[in-house]
Amino acid sequence: MASVVLSEAEKVYIVHGVQEDLRVDGRGCDDYRCVEVETDVVSNTSGSARVKLGHTDILVGVKAEVGTPKLEKADEGYLEFFVDCSANATPEFEGRGGDDLGTEIANTLYRIFNKSSVDLKALCISPREHCWVLYVDVLLLECGGNLFDSISIAVKAALFNTRIPRVRVLEDEEGSKDIELSDDPYDCIRLSVENVPCTVTLCKIGCRHVVDATLQEEACSLASLLVSVTSKGVVTCMRKVGKGSLDPESIFEMMETGKRVGKVLHSSLQKILLKEESLGPKRQKVGFLG
Amino acid sequence: MAGLELLSDQGYRVDGRRAGELRKIQARMGVFAQADGSAYIEQGNTKALAVVYGPHEIRGSRSRALPDRALVNCQYSSATFSTGERKRRPHGDRKSSEMGLQLRQTFEAAILTQLHPRSQIDIYVQVLQADGGTYAACVNAATLAVLDAGIPMRDFVCACSAGFVDGTSLADLSHVEEAAGGPQLALALLPASGQIALLEMDARLHEDHLEQVLEAAARAARDVHTLLDRVVRQHVQEASLLLGD
Protein backbone atom coordinates (compact mmCIF):
# COMPACT_ATOMS: atom_id res chain seq x y z
CA MET A 1 0.00 0.00 0.00
CA ALA A 2 1.10 3.56 -0.42
CA SER A 3 2.76 4.30 2.87
CA VAL A 4 2.58 7.47 4.89
CA VAL A 5 4.98 8.40 7.67
CA LEU A 6 3.37 9.56 10.91
CA SER A 7 5.04 10.92 14.00
CA GLU A 8 4.23 9.55 17.45
CA ALA A 9 2.31 12.67 18.39
CA GLU A 10 0.08 12.37 15.31
CA LYS A 11 -0.61 8.70 16.09
CA VAL A 12 -1.53 9.50 19.69
CA TYR A 13 -3.82 12.30 18.46
CA ILE A 14 -5.66 9.95 16.11
CA VAL A 15 -5.99 7.14 18.67
CA HIS A 16 -7.31 9.44 21.40
CA GLY A 17 -9.77 11.02 19.01
CA VAL A 18 -11.15 7.65 17.95
CA GLN A 19 -11.75 6.67 21.60
CA GLU A 20 -14.08 9.70 21.80
CA ASP A 21 -15.82 8.81 18.49
CA LEU A 22 -14.29 11.84 16.78
CA ARG A 23 -11.95 11.34 13.85
CA VAL A 24 -9.50 13.82 12.34
CA ASP A 25 -11.90 14.98 9.61
CA GLY A 26 -14.87 15.20 12.01
CA ARG A 27 -16.55 11.90 11.09
CA GLY A 28 -17.91 9.39 13.58
CA CYS A 29 -16.54 5.85 13.74
CA ASP A 30 -19.27 4.47 11.45
CA ASP A 31 -19.28 7.17 8.79
CA TYR A 32 -18.01 6.87 5.25
CA ARG A 33 -16.37 9.71 3.39
CA CYS A 34 -18.22 11.25 0.46
CA VAL A 35 -18.37 8.65 -2.34
CA GLU A 36 -18.67 9.70 -5.99
CA VAL A 37 -19.80 6.98 -8.39
CA GLU A 38 -20.12 7.36 -12.14
CA THR A 39 -20.83 4.59 -14.64
CA ASP A 40 -20.16 4.28 -18.36
CA VAL A 41 -16.91 6.20 -18.28
CA VAL A 42 -14.97 4.12 -20.86
CA SER A 43 -16.94 3.60 -24.02
CA ASN A 44 -15.36 0.52 -25.59
CA THR A 45 -16.11 -1.76 -22.67
CA SER A 46 -19.31 -3.66 -21.93
CA GLY A 47 -19.61 -1.78 -18.66
CA SER A 48 -17.45 0.54 -16.60
CA ALA A 49 -17.54 2.56 -13.42
CA ARG A 50 -15.39 5.11 -11.60
CA VAL A 51 -15.46 5.49 -7.83
CA LYS A 52 -13.83 8.32 -5.91
CA LEU A 53 -13.74 7.85 -2.12
CA GLY A 54 -11.79 10.72 -0.57
CA HIS A 55 -8.35 10.44 -2.18
CA THR A 56 -8.91 6.88 -3.44
CA ASP A 57 -9.69 6.67 -7.16
CA ILE A 58 -10.70 3.40 -8.83
CA LEU A 59 -11.69 2.70 -12.44
CA VAL A 60 -13.28 -0.66 -13.33
CA GLY A 61 -13.90 -1.91 -16.87
CA VAL A 62 -15.89 -5.05 -17.67
CA LYS A 63 -15.36 -6.73 -21.02
CA ALA A 64 -17.61 -9.60 -22.10
CA GLU A 65 -16.01 -12.12 -24.43
CA VAL A 66 -17.15 -15.47 -25.77
CA GLY A 67 -15.23 -18.41 -24.36
CA THR A 68 -15.56 -22.08 -23.48
CA PRO A 69 -17.18 -23.00 -20.18
CA LYS A 70 -15.18 -24.68 -17.43
CA LEU A 71 -15.36 -28.48 -17.42
CA GLU A 72 -17.06 -28.89 -14.08
CA LYS A 73 -19.65 -26.16 -14.71
CA ALA A 74 -20.59 -26.75 -18.32
CA ASP A 75 -23.77 -24.67 -18.36
CA GLU A 76 -22.45 -21.53 -16.69
CA GLY A 77 -20.30 -18.59 -17.67
CA TYR A 78 -17.69 -17.17 -15.30
CA LEU A 79 -15.98 -14.00 -14.08
CA GLU A 80 -12.26 -13.29 -14.20
CA PHE A 81 -10.78 -10.55 -12.03
CA PHE A 82 -7.60 -8.63 -12.73
CA VAL A 83 -6.29 -5.78 -10.61
CA ASP A 84 -3.69 -3.35 -11.94
CA CYS A 85 -2.06 -1.10 -9.33
CA SER A 86 -0.82 1.61 -11.64
CA ALA A 87 2.25 3.71 -10.94
CA ASN A 88 -0.04 6.77 -10.88
CA ALA A 89 -0.91 5.95 -7.28
CA THR A 90 2.64 5.89 -5.98
CA PRO A 91 6.09 5.46 -7.58
CA GLU A 92 6.56 2.24 -5.58
CA PHE A 93 4.11 0.57 -7.97
CA GLU A 94 6.32 1.12 -11.00
CA GLY A 95 7.17 -1.94 -13.08
CA ARG A 96 6.30 -5.03 -11.09
CA GLY A 97 6.07 -3.23 -7.73
CA GLY A 98 2.28 -3.20 -7.74
CA ASP A 99 1.88 -6.89 -8.62
CA ASP A 100 1.80 -8.17 -5.03
CA LEU A 101 -0.96 -5.87 -3.93
CA GLY A 102 -2.83 -6.49 -7.18
CA THR A 103 -2.75 -10.27 -6.73
CA GLU A 104 -3.90 -9.94 -3.12
CA ILE A 105 -6.88 -7.80 -4.09
CA ALA A 106 -7.78 -10.07 -7.02
CA ASN A 107 -7.70 -13.15 -4.79
CA THR A 108 -9.94 -11.41 -2.28
CA LEU A 109 -12.39 -10.56 -5.06
CA TYR A 110 -12.48 -14.22 -6.14
CA ARG A 111 -13.25 -15.23 -2.54
CA ILE A 112 -15.98 -12.63 -2.13
CA PHE A 113 -17.88 -13.61 -5.26
CA ASN A 114 -19.44 -16.98 -4.65
CA LYS A 115 -21.95 -19.01 -6.67
CA SER A 116 -24.99 -16.93 -5.80
CA SER A 117 -23.52 -13.45 -6.32
CA VAL A 118 -24.08 -13.25 -10.05
CA ASP A 119 -26.47 -15.41 -12.09
CA LEU A 120 -23.88 -17.41 -14.01
CA LYS A 121 -26.45 -19.51 -15.86
CA ALA A 122 -27.61 -16.39 -17.70
CA LEU A 123 -24.09 -16.13 -19.14
CA CYS A 124 -24.35 -19.49 -20.89
CA ILE A 125 -24.78 -19.46 -24.69
CA SER A 126 -24.72 -23.16 -25.49
CA PRO A 127 -23.81 -25.73 -22.81
CA ARG A 128 -20.33 -27.25 -22.98
CA GLU A 129 -19.42 -25.14 -26.01
CA HIS A 130 -19.86 -21.41 -25.61
CA CYS A 131 -20.41 -19.09 -22.72
CA TRP A 132 -19.80 -15.46 -21.81
CA VAL A 133 -16.67 -14.76 -19.83
CA LEU A 134 -16.76 -11.42 -17.98
CA TYR A 135 -13.28 -9.96 -17.54
CA VAL A 136 -13.52 -7.49 -14.69
CA ASP A 137 -10.42 -5.27 -14.78
CA VAL A 138 -9.76 -2.96 -11.86
CA LEU A 139 -7.40 -0.02 -12.29
CA LEU A 140 -6.14 1.62 -9.12
CA LEU A 141 -5.36 5.24 -9.90
CA GLU A 142 -4.90 6.87 -6.54
CA CYS A 143 -4.47 5.33 -3.12
CA GLY A 144 -6.00 7.21 -0.21
CA GLY A 145 -6.84 4.38 2.16
CA ASN A 146 -9.68 1.85 2.19
CA LEU A 147 -8.94 0.15 -1.11
CA PHE A 148 -11.09 -2.97 -0.72
CA ASP A 149 -14.31 -1.10 -0.06
CA SER A 150 -13.95 1.28 -2.97
CA ILE A 151 -12.99 -1.55 -5.32
CA SER A 152 -16.01 -3.61 -4.34
CA ILE A 153 -18.34 -0.62 -4.83
CA ALA A 154 -16.79 0.05 -8.24
CA VAL A 155 -17.10 -3.61 -9.28
CA LYS A 156 -20.76 -3.65 -8.28
CA ALA A 157 -21.46 -0.42 -10.18
CA ALA A 158 -19.61 -1.69 -13.27
CA LEU A 159 -21.52 -4.99 -13.25
CA PHE A 160 -24.77 -3.02 -12.94
CA ASN A 161 -23.73 -1.00 -16.00
CA THR A 162 -22.68 -4.06 -18.05
CA ARG A 163 -24.64 -4.69 -21.21
CA ILE A 164 -23.99 -8.06 -22.85
CA PRO A 165 -25.24 -8.35 -26.45
CA ARG A 166 -27.82 -11.02 -27.11
CA VAL A 167 -26.56 -13.78 -29.37
CA ARG A 168 -28.07 -16.70 -31.21
CA VAL A 169 -26.36 -19.92 -32.08
CA LEU A 170 -26.99 -20.97 -35.66
CA GLU A 171 -26.38 -24.51 -36.73
CA ASP A 172 -25.86 -25.29 -40.39
CA GLU A 173 -26.11 -28.60 -42.26
CA GLU A 174 -22.65 -29.95 -41.40
CA GLY A 175 -23.30 -29.38 -37.71
CA SER A 176 -20.79 -26.54 -37.22
CA LYS A 177 -22.14 -23.79 -35.03
CA ASP A 178 -21.92 -20.09 -35.68
CA ILE A 179 -22.65 -17.32 -33.21
CA GLU A 180 -24.68 -14.43 -34.50
CA LEU A 181 -25.08 -11.09 -32.79
CA SER A 182 -28.54 -9.59 -32.87
CA ASP A 183 -28.94 -6.64 -35.24
CA ASP A 184 -30.21 -4.18 -32.68
CA PRO A 185 -27.23 -2.74 -30.72
CA TYR A 186 -29.48 -1.93 -27.76
CA ASP A 187 -30.78 -5.49 -27.44
CA CYS A 188 -28.74 -6.80 -24.56
CA ILE A 189 -28.77 -8.79 -21.35
CA ARG A 190 -28.35 -6.91 -18.07
CA LEU A 191 -27.03 -8.58 -14.94
CA SER A 192 -28.89 -8.51 -11.67
CA VAL A 193 -26.56 -7.16 -9.00
CA GLU A 194 -28.88 -7.74 -6.02
CA ASN A 195 -26.69 -10.41 -4.51
CA VAL A 196 -23.33 -8.84 -5.40
CA PRO A 197 -21.54 -8.21 -2.11
CA CYS A 198 -19.66 -5.13 -0.96
CA THR A 199 -16.74 -5.26 1.45
CA VAL A 200 -16.63 -3.22 4.61
CA THR A 201 -13.18 -2.86 6.15
CA LEU A 202 -13.12 -2.25 9.88
CA CYS A 203 -9.80 -1.11 11.34
CA LYS A 204 -9.11 -1.58 15.00
CA ILE A 205 -7.61 1.57 16.51
CA GLY A 206 -7.02 1.43 20.25
CA CYS A 207 -10.06 -0.36 21.63
CA ARG A 208 -12.59 0.89 19.08
CA HIS A 209 -12.98 0.13 15.42
CA VAL A 210 -13.52 2.53 12.53
CA VAL A 211 -15.11 2.19 9.12
CA ASP A 212 -13.46 3.68 6.01
CA ALA A 213 -10.03 4.47 7.38
CA THR A 214 -7.80 7.03 5.67
CA LEU A 215 -4.11 6.29 5.04
CA GLN A 216 -3.16 8.00 8.32
CA GLU A 217 -5.69 5.95 10.30
CA GLU A 218 -4.53 2.73 8.65
CA ALA A 219 -1.00 3.53 9.80
CA CYS A 220 -2.29 3.66 13.40
CA SER A 221 -4.24 0.42 13.30
CA LEU A 222 -2.61 -2.94 13.86
CA ALA A 223 -5.35 -5.22 12.61
CA SER A 224 -8.42 -4.95 10.39
CA LEU A 225 -11.36 -7.13 9.60
CA LEU A 226 -12.74 -7.35 6.07
CA VAL A 227 -16.39 -8.33 5.99
CA SER A 228 -18.15 -8.88 2.69
CA VAL A 229 -21.90 -8.30 2.96
CA THR A 230 -24.74 -8.54 0.45
CA SER A 231 -27.66 -6.12 0.37
CA LYS A 232 -29.76 -8.53 2.45
CA GLY A 233 -27.16 -8.68 5.20
CA VAL A 234 -25.73 -12.10 4.29
CA VAL A 235 -22.00 -12.37 5.00
CA THR A 236 -20.14 -14.06 2.14
CA CYS A 237 -16.56 -13.73 3.30
CA MET A 238 -14.61 -12.60 6.34
CA ARG A 239 -10.90 -12.03 6.58
CA LYS A 240 -8.53 -10.60 9.13
CA VAL A 241 -5.67 -8.56 7.72
CA GLY A 242 -2.78 -6.85 9.42
CA LYS A 243 0.08 -7.85 11.64
CA GLY A 244 -1.64 -7.42 15.00
CA SER A 245 -4.07 -9.76 16.71
CA LEU A 246 -7.76 -9.43 17.51
CA ASP A 247 -9.68 -10.98 20.38
CA PRO A 248 -12.89 -12.89 19.60
CA GLU A 249 -15.24 -10.34 21.21
CA SER A 250 -13.96 -7.55 19.01
CA ILE A 251 -14.39 -9.75 15.97
CA PHE A 252 -18.08 -10.29 16.76
CA GLU A 253 -18.62 -6.59 17.42
CA MET A 254 -16.85 -5.63 14.20
CA MET A 255 -18.90 -8.13 12.24
CA GLU A 256 -22.15 -6.66 13.57
CA THR A 257 -21.02 -3.14 12.68
CA GLY A 258 -19.93 -4.40 9.26
CA LYS A 259 -23.35 -5.91 8.54
CA ARG A 260 -25.17 -2.79 9.66
CA VAL A 261 -22.95 -0.39 7.71
CA GLY A 262 -22.93 -2.71 4.69
CA LYS A 263 -26.72 -2.69 4.40
CA VAL A 264 -26.80 1.11 4.45
CA LEU A 265 -24.00 1.24 1.88
CA HIS A 266 -25.91 -1.09 -0.44
CA SER A 267 -29.13 0.87 -0.24
CA SER A 268 -27.42 4.22 -0.98
CA LEU A 269 -25.46 2.71 -3.86
CA GLN A 270 -28.60 1.18 -5.34
CA LYS A 271 -30.40 4.52 -5.11
CA ILE A 272 -27.59 6.34 -6.90
CA LEU A 273 -27.26 3.73 -9.64
CA LEU A 274 -31.00 3.77 -10.34
CA LYS A 275 -31.04 7.56 -10.37
CA GLU A 276 -28.16 7.67 -12.84
CA GLU A 277 -29.90 5.11 -15.03
CA SER A 278 -33.14 7.05 -15.01
CA LEU A 279 -31.36 10.06 -16.54
CA GLY A 280 -30.97 7.93 -19.65
CA PRO A 281 -28.61 8.48 -22.61
CA LYS A 282 -28.87 12.29 -22.29
CA ARG A 283 -26.92 12.19 -19.03
CA GLN A 284 -23.91 14.51 -19.01
CA LYS A 285 -20.81 12.34 -18.73
CA VAL A 286 -18.23 14.01 -16.55
CA GLY A 287 -15.49 11.42 -16.11
CA PHE A 288 -12.14 12.96 -15.18
CA LEU A 289 -12.97 16.36 -16.65
CA GLY A 290 -15.20 17.54 -13.86
CA MET B 1 -11.49 -2.95 -43.76
CA ALA B 2 -12.11 -3.61 -47.43
CA GLY B 3 -14.27 -1.02 -49.06
CA LEU B 4 -13.71 1.61 -46.37
CA GLU B 5 -12.62 4.85 -47.96
CA LEU B 6 -10.25 6.82 -45.80
CA LEU B 7 -10.74 9.98 -47.81
CA SER B 8 -13.90 10.47 -49.85
CA ASP B 9 -14.09 12.42 -53.14
CA GLN B 10 -15.49 15.46 -51.34
CA GLY B 11 -12.51 15.42 -48.98
CA TYR B 12 -14.18 13.96 -45.89
CA ARG B 13 -12.60 11.28 -43.73
CA VAL B 14 -14.27 8.29 -42.11
CA ASP B 15 -15.44 10.28 -39.06
CA GLY B 16 -16.47 13.33 -41.09
CA ARG B 17 -13.39 15.47 -40.52
CA ARG B 18 -11.42 17.33 -43.18
CA ALA B 19 -7.87 16.26 -44.00
CA GLY B 20 -6.08 18.72 -41.70
CA GLU B 21 -8.70 18.83 -38.94
CA LEU B 22 -7.94 17.65 -35.40
CA ARG B 23 -10.34 15.68 -33.19
CA LYS B 24 -12.02 17.44 -30.29
CA ILE B 25 -9.53 17.98 -27.47
CA GLN B 26 -10.56 18.46 -23.86
CA ALA B 27 -8.04 18.57 -21.05
CA ARG B 28 -7.83 19.17 -17.34
CA MET B 29 -4.90 19.74 -14.99
CA GLY B 30 -4.67 18.83 -11.34
CA VAL B 31 -6.83 15.70 -11.46
CA PHE B 32 -5.19 13.96 -8.46
CA ALA B 33 -4.36 15.70 -5.23
CA GLN B 34 -1.68 13.33 -3.93
CA ALA B 35 0.65 13.44 -6.93
CA ASP B 36 3.00 16.35 -7.57
CA GLY B 37 1.41 17.02 -10.95
CA SER B 38 -1.34 15.35 -12.93
CA ALA B 39 -3.38 15.92 -16.07
CA TYR B 40 -6.05 14.24 -18.16
CA ILE B 41 -6.63 14.67 -21.88
CA GLU B 42 -9.28 13.45 -24.31
CA GLN B 43 -8.46 13.57 -28.03
CA GLY B 44 -11.60 12.32 -29.70
CA ASN B 45 -12.08 8.87 -28.18
CA THR B 46 -8.49 8.51 -26.96
CA LYS B 47 -8.25 9.18 -23.22
CA ALA B 48 -4.92 9.47 -21.39
CA LEU B 49 -3.90 10.31 -17.84
CA ALA B 50 -0.44 11.52 -16.88
CA VAL B 51 1.02 11.81 -13.40
CA VAL B 52 4.35 13.34 -12.42
CA TYR B 53 6.32 12.74 -9.22
CA GLY B 54 9.39 14.80 -8.62
CA PRO B 55 11.97 16.08 -8.61
CA HIS B 56 12.88 13.77 -5.75
CA GLU B 57 15.81 11.67 -4.63
CA ILE B 58 16.85 8.80 -6.88
CA ARG B 59 15.01 5.61 -5.96
CA GLY B 60 16.91 2.36 -6.12
CA SER B 61 20.61 2.44 -6.91
CA ARG B 62 22.42 5.72 -6.19
CA SER B 63 24.88 4.93 -8.95
CA ARG B 64 22.31 5.94 -11.55
CA ALA B 65 22.40 9.53 -10.32
CA LEU B 66 23.76 11.98 -12.87
CA PRO B 67 26.07 14.61 -11.36
CA ASP B 68 24.98 17.50 -13.56
CA ARG B 69 21.31 16.88 -14.37
CA ALA B 70 18.11 15.14 -13.34
CA LEU B 71 17.15 11.65 -14.42
CA VAL B 72 13.86 11.48 -16.30
CA ASN B 73 12.03 8.19 -15.87
CA CYS B 74 8.89 7.41 -17.89
CA GLN B 75 6.48 4.52 -17.83
CA TYR B 76 3.76 3.98 -20.40
CA SER B 77 0.88 1.73 -19.40
CA SER B 78 -2.38 1.08 -21.16
CA ALA B 79 -5.34 -0.38 -19.31
CA THR B 80 -6.42 -3.88 -20.23
CA PHE B 81 -9.82 -2.57 -21.27
CA SER B 82 -8.44 0.27 -23.37
CA THR B 83 -8.33 -1.48 -26.72
CA GLY B 84 -11.13 -3.18 -28.64
CA GLU B 85 -9.74 -6.62 -27.80
CA ARG B 86 -8.73 -7.08 -24.18
CA LYS B 87 -4.98 -6.73 -23.53
CA ARG B 88 -3.44 -9.29 -21.22
CA ARG B 89 -0.76 -7.19 -19.55
CA PRO B 90 -1.03 -3.44 -18.97
CA HIS B 91 2.73 -2.83 -19.18
CA GLY B 92 5.95 -4.79 -19.44
CA ASP B 93 5.54 -5.79 -23.06
CA ARG B 94 7.83 -4.52 -25.79
CA LYS B 95 5.52 -1.84 -27.12
CA SER B 96 5.03 -0.26 -23.70
CA SER B 97 8.78 -0.29 -22.99
CA GLU B 98 9.46 1.32 -26.36
CA MET B 99 6.83 4.01 -25.76
CA GLY B 100 8.37 4.67 -22.34
CA LEU B 101 11.79 5.19 -23.93
CA GLN B 102 10.31 7.49 -26.57
CA LEU B 103 8.55 9.58 -23.94
CA ARG B 104 11.78 9.78 -21.99
CA GLN B 105 13.66 11.01 -25.04
CA THR B 106 10.96 13.59 -25.73
CA PHE B 107 10.93 15.02 -22.25
CA GLU B 108 14.69 15.03 -21.74
CA ALA B 109 14.76 17.49 -24.63
CA ALA B 110 12.23 19.80 -23.03
CA ILE B 111 12.71 19.70 -19.25
CA LEU B 112 15.49 21.90 -17.85
CA THR B 113 17.25 19.00 -16.18
CA GLN B 114 20.38 21.03 -15.33
CA LEU B 115 18.42 22.78 -12.57
CA HIS B 116 17.98 19.56 -10.57
CA PRO B 117 21.23 17.55 -10.50
CA ARG B 118 21.30 14.17 -8.77
CA SER B 119 17.52 13.88 -8.66
CA GLN B 120 14.81 11.95 -10.47
CA ILE B 121 11.62 13.03 -12.22
CA ASP B 122 9.02 10.28 -12.75
CA ILE B 123 6.41 10.61 -15.48
CA TYR B 124 3.74 7.91 -15.53
CA VAL B 125 1.26 7.82 -18.37
CA GLN B 126 -1.88 5.68 -18.35
CA VAL B 127 -4.02 5.20 -21.45
CA LEU B 128 -7.65 4.58 -20.51
CA GLN B 129 -9.08 4.29 -24.00
CA ALA B 130 -7.07 3.88 -27.19
CA ASP B 131 -8.53 5.11 -30.46
CA GLY B 132 -5.42 6.09 -32.40
CA GLY B 133 -2.86 8.77 -31.64
CA THR B 134 -1.95 7.32 -28.25
CA TYR B 135 1.65 8.60 -28.35
CA ALA B 136 0.44 12.12 -29.13
CA ALA B 137 -2.19 12.07 -26.39
CA CYS B 138 0.40 10.78 -23.89
CA VAL B 139 2.88 13.53 -24.73
CA ASN B 140 0.22 16.25 -24.51
CA ALA B 141 -1.06 14.91 -21.17
CA ALA B 142 2.49 14.59 -19.82
CA THR B 143 3.30 18.19 -20.81
CA LEU B 144 0.31 19.43 -18.82
CA ALA B 145 1.23 17.22 -15.88
CA VAL B 146 4.85 18.47 -15.83
CA LEU B 147 3.54 22.06 -15.90
CA ASP B 148 1.12 21.21 -13.08
CA ALA B 149 4.04 19.89 -11.03
CA GLY B 150 5.88 23.17 -11.50
CA ILE B 151 8.93 21.60 -13.14
CA PRO B 152 10.61 24.17 -15.43
CA MET B 153 10.52 23.33 -19.13
CA ARG B 154 12.09 24.93 -22.16
CA ASP B 155 8.73 25.08 -23.95
CA PHE B 156 5.48 23.12 -24.30
CA VAL B 157 5.86 19.76 -26.00
CA CYS B 158 2.99 19.25 -28.41
CA ALA B 159 2.57 16.08 -30.41
CA CYS B 160 0.40 14.94 -33.26
CA SER B 161 0.27 12.06 -35.71
CA ALA B 162 -0.06 12.39 -39.48
CA GLY B 163 -0.67 10.05 -42.38
CA PHE B 164 -0.75 10.12 -46.16
CA VAL B 165 -3.62 8.91 -48.36
CA ASP B 166 -4.25 9.62 -52.06
CA GLY B 167 -1.78 12.49 -52.28
CA THR B 168 -3.22 14.29 -49.23
CA SER B 169 -1.73 14.33 -45.76
CA LEU B 170 -4.13 13.63 -42.89
CA ALA B 171 -3.59 15.03 -39.40
CA ASP B 172 -4.46 13.27 -36.11
CA LEU B 173 -5.18 9.71 -37.18
CA SER B 174 -7.86 7.63 -35.51
CA HIS B 175 -7.55 3.87 -34.96
CA VAL B 176 -9.39 3.03 -38.18
CA GLU B 177 -6.97 5.15 -40.21
CA GLU B 178 -3.93 3.71 -38.42
CA ALA B 179 -5.06 0.14 -38.94
CA ALA B 180 -5.49 0.71 -42.67
CA GLY B 181 -1.74 0.28 -43.05
CA GLY B 182 -0.64 3.50 -44.69
CA PRO B 183 2.39 5.57 -43.62
CA GLN B 184 2.08 7.14 -40.15
CA LEU B 185 4.29 9.84 -38.73
CA ALA B 186 4.45 10.78 -35.05
CA LEU B 187 5.88 14.22 -34.31
CA ALA B 188 6.64 15.95 -31.02
CA LEU B 189 7.35 19.65 -31.44
CA LEU B 190 8.53 22.53 -29.26
CA PRO B 191 6.27 25.19 -30.81
CA ALA B 192 8.04 28.46 -29.96
CA SER B 193 11.32 27.51 -31.58
CA GLY B 194 9.94 24.98 -34.04
CA GLN B 195 12.43 22.36 -32.82
CA ILE B 196 11.48 18.71 -33.17
CA ALA B 197 11.84 16.61 -30.00
CA LEU B 198 10.83 13.30 -31.55
CA LEU B 199 10.08 12.17 -35.07
CA GLU B 200 9.07 8.64 -35.84
CA MET B 201 7.75 7.01 -38.97
CA ASP B 202 7.67 3.37 -39.97
CA ALA B 203 6.22 2.63 -43.39
CA ARG B 204 7.11 3.31 -46.98
CA LEU B 205 6.73 6.90 -48.05
CA HIS B 206 8.35 8.53 -51.05
CA GLU B 207 10.75 11.26 -49.94
CA ASP B 208 8.99 13.81 -52.16
CA HIS B 209 5.93 13.54 -49.94
CA LEU B 210 7.82 13.69 -46.64
CA GLU B 211 7.94 17.48 -46.48
CA GLN B 212 4.17 17.73 -47.00
CA VAL B 213 3.37 15.21 -44.28
CA LEU B 214 5.85 16.79 -41.87
CA GLU B 215 4.33 20.21 -42.50
CA ALA B 216 0.82 18.85 -41.81
CA ALA B 217 1.97 17.29 -38.55
CA ALA B 218 3.77 20.48 -37.48
CA ARG B 219 0.70 22.60 -38.22
CA ALA B 220 -1.50 20.23 -36.23
CA ALA B 221 0.97 20.28 -33.32
CA ARG B 222 0.83 24.09 -33.28
CA ASP B 223 -2.98 23.91 -33.13
CA VAL B 224 -2.66 21.55 -30.16
CA HIS B 225 -0.31 24.10 -28.57
CA THR B 226 -2.98 26.82 -28.80
CA LEU B 227 -5.46 24.54 -27.03
CA LEU B 228 -3.05 23.44 -24.31
CA ASP B 229 -2.00 27.05 -23.68
CA ARG B 230 -5.64 27.95 -23.14
CA VAL B 231 -6.11 25.07 -20.71
CA VAL B 232 -3.07 26.11 -18.66
CA ARG B 233 -4.16 29.75 -18.46
CA GLN B 234 -7.65 28.76 -17.40
CA HIS B 235 -6.25 26.45 -14.71
CA VAL B 236 -3.99 29.18 -13.33
CA GLN B 237 -6.90 31.62 -13.32
CA GLU B 238 -9.08 29.17 -11.37
CA ALA B 239 -6.30 28.47 -8.90
CA SER B 240 -5.66 32.14 -8.27
CA LEU B 241 -9.39 32.75 -7.76
CA LEU B 242 -9.38 30.04 -5.10
CA LEU B 243 -6.41 31.67 -3.41
CA GLY B 244 -8.45 34.82 -3.15
CA ASP B 245 -6.46 37.68 -4.53
Image (cartoon, rainbow, N blue to C red):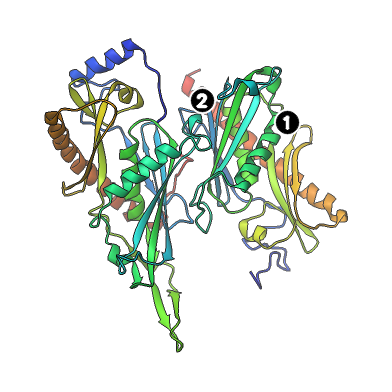
Mark closest to the chain's N terminus, 1 or 2: 1
Left or right: where A157 falls relative to B207: left
Which mark lies nearer to you, 1 or 2?
Answer: 1
Determine the image quadrant of residue B120.
Answer: top right
Horizontal side of residue A66 vs A26, given as left or right: right
Spot the residue most to the right.
B208
Mark 1 Cα within 10 Å, few/some/many (few <14, many 20+)? some
* Residue in the picture at 71% in, 64% down: B7
Residues marked 1 and 2, same chain: yes
Disc 1: host chain: B
Which residue is denoted by mark 2 in the rendering? B239
Tally the marks: 2
Residue at the location (66% across, 35% down)? B104
How far from the left and from the top, in percent, is residue A121? 28, 66
Residue toward you, A222 or A189: A222
Query: Measuring 32% from the left and 46% from the top, which residue is drawn there?
Result: A109
- Could you say which quadrant of the image residue B10 lies in? bottom right
Tag 2's secondary structure? Answer: helix
Furthest-bottom residue in this view: A173
Q: Position of residue A59 (x, y in %)?
A: 42, 44
Work out whether residue B244 or residue B44 is closer to the camera in this orientation and state it. B44
Instruction: Identify which residue is drawn at 65% across, 43% down.
Output: B98
Identity of the amino acid at label 2? Ala
Q: Disc 2: which chain?
A: B
Q: Which residue is mark 1?
A: B109
